[in-house]
Structure formats: C-alpha cells, structure tokens
C-alpha cells in the first residue's frame, strides 16, 4: 500500500509542477500580447496622422510647389521652404497657433489645418509634446532619414514614448533611445 501512495504523491507533484509552468507561460504570453497590442494602437495612430497630413498637404499644393495649375500644366518644383516642413530638433518655420476647430468653425487655411494636425498629433501619441520638436520631422528628402531639401520625396517621421525597451522597432539603425518609437513615411506628392 505504501508503494502506491508514494507514486501517487509523486505523480500529483509532477502534475502540479507542469500546471504551474503552463500557467506562468500563459501569464508571460498575456503580458507580451498587451505590449504588442499597445504598440499596434500607437503605430496605427501614427499611420493615420501621417496619412491625414499627406491629405492636407495635397489639398494645399500651392504651399509645396513652385508651379501649380492652372497657370502651369502640372504640379512641379517642390519648394525648399514650406509651412509644412519641420526639421528634427527645430520648430516649424511659421509658429504653430492654437487649433481653430470648433462646432462653429473649421480650419480653412493651410496653416490652420496644419496647426490642428499638430494639436491632434500631440494629443494622440504618448509623449509627443516632448518628442515633437526633438524627433518628429516633415521634410524634403532624397534619401531615407535625411532632410536634405533635395529630391521629390517628402518624408514624415512621428515619434512617441514607450516604457523602456517596449518599442518593437529595430534600434540598431537609429540613434534613438529604447523608450522612443518612430513611424516614418516617404511619399511623392
């Protein structure tokens, strides 16, 4: 009788150990899943903000191009300076005012649209108020990651804060710390 009782106790302990390891694995997987979900939400917000800015820029082509229809047959000659351009570590060329959007008033000028977009970006992305001047930019770029005022591409980079090492970006190719994530879009307008 004692032999069977010992084997049963060992079987119960092994089962308890395996169950505990399984539960701990599920808890770790749940934590990782929350991290991936949060990254997806923030990245999706950055994508929507960049897309919205591209739409605003296309709607106000006169702020980007030196030659525009109907005087010229095609949009051509990107300006080297525009109220939409902002280099990393600096502010916009024209000061950003408070957003004029309300139930009675909508932004009408290119600058008002840009100012409301900036307010949305700062409100939507975590830490964006701090990172907007330092790591976010909108510029003409001939090479990815370089604001050289050349070429026909406009590059938009938005940055936001995360907990330490929670960014799913590859930090090897960037000079940002482990608490900053970025979304970069290059588009030919």
Image (cartoon, rainbow, N blue to C red):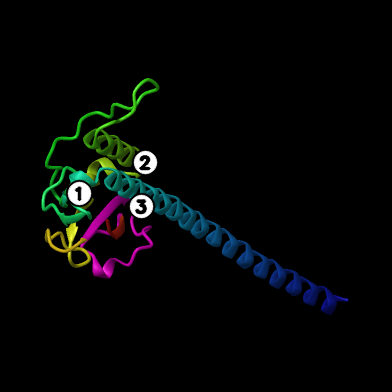
> Splitting the image into 4 quarters, where does residue 124 fall?
top left
Q: Residue at 28% x, 66% y: name it.
A: 171
Cα separation, mark 2 vs mark 1, equals 33 Å
Q: Nearer the viewer, mark 2 or mark 1?
A: 1
Would you say residue 159 sits in the magenta stretch? yes
Image spot of residue 170 (x, y percent): 32, 67
Q: Which residue is mark 1?
A: 68
Q: Nearer the viewer, mark 1 or mark 3?
A: 1
Mark 2, other Cα within 10 Å: few <14 / some 14–19 / many ≥20:
some
As helix, strand or loop, the secondary structure at mark 1 comes to: loop
As helix, strand or loop, the secondary structure at mark 3 comes to: loop
> Splitting the image into 4 quarters, where does residue 10 fall?
bottom right
Work out whether residue 84 can be spotted. no
Q: Going from the N terminus, do you reach mark 1 or mark 3 first?
A: 1
As helix, strand or loop, the secondary structure at mark 2 comes to: helix
- Quadrant in which the C terminus appears: bottom left
| Image label count | 3
Q: Which residue is mark 3?
A: 163
152 or 14: nearer the viewer: 152
85 or 21: nearer the viewer: 85
> Splitting the image into 4 quarters, where does residue 17 fall?
bottom right
Q: Which residue is mark 2?
A: 124
Labelled pair 2, 1 in contact (Cβ < 8 Å): no
**Highlighted magenta segment, given as a residue range:** 153-180
Would you say residue 118 sits in the magenta stretch? no
Q: Residue at 29% x, 48% y: name it.
A: 58
- Quadrant in which the N terminus appears: bottom right
Work out whether residue 104 can be spotted. yes
């Amino acid at each position: 009788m004692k032999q069977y009782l010992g084997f049963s106790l060992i079987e119960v302990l092994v089962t308890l150990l395996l169950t505990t390891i399984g539960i701990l694995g599920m808890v770790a997987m749940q934590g990782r899943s929350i991290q991936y979900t949060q990254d997806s939400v923030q990245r999706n917000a950055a994508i929507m903000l960049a897309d919205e800015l591209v739409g605003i820029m296309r709607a106000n082509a006169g702020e980007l191009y030196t030659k525009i229809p109907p005087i010229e047959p095609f949009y051509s000659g990107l300006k080297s300076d525009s109220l939409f351009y902002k280099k990393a570590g600096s502010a916009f060329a024209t000061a950003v005012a408070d957003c004029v959007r309300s139930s009675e008033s909508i932004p009408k000028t290119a600058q008002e649209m840009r100012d409301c977009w900036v307010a949305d970006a700062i409100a939507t992305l975590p830490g964006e108020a701090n990172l907007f001047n330092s790591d976010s930019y909108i510029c003409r770029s001939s090479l990815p990651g370089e604001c050289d005022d050349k070429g026909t591409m406009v590059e938009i980079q938005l940055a936001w804060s995360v907990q330490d090492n929670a960014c799913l970006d590859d930090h090897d190719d960037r000079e940002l710390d482990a608490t900053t994530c970025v979304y970069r879009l290059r588009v030919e307008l």
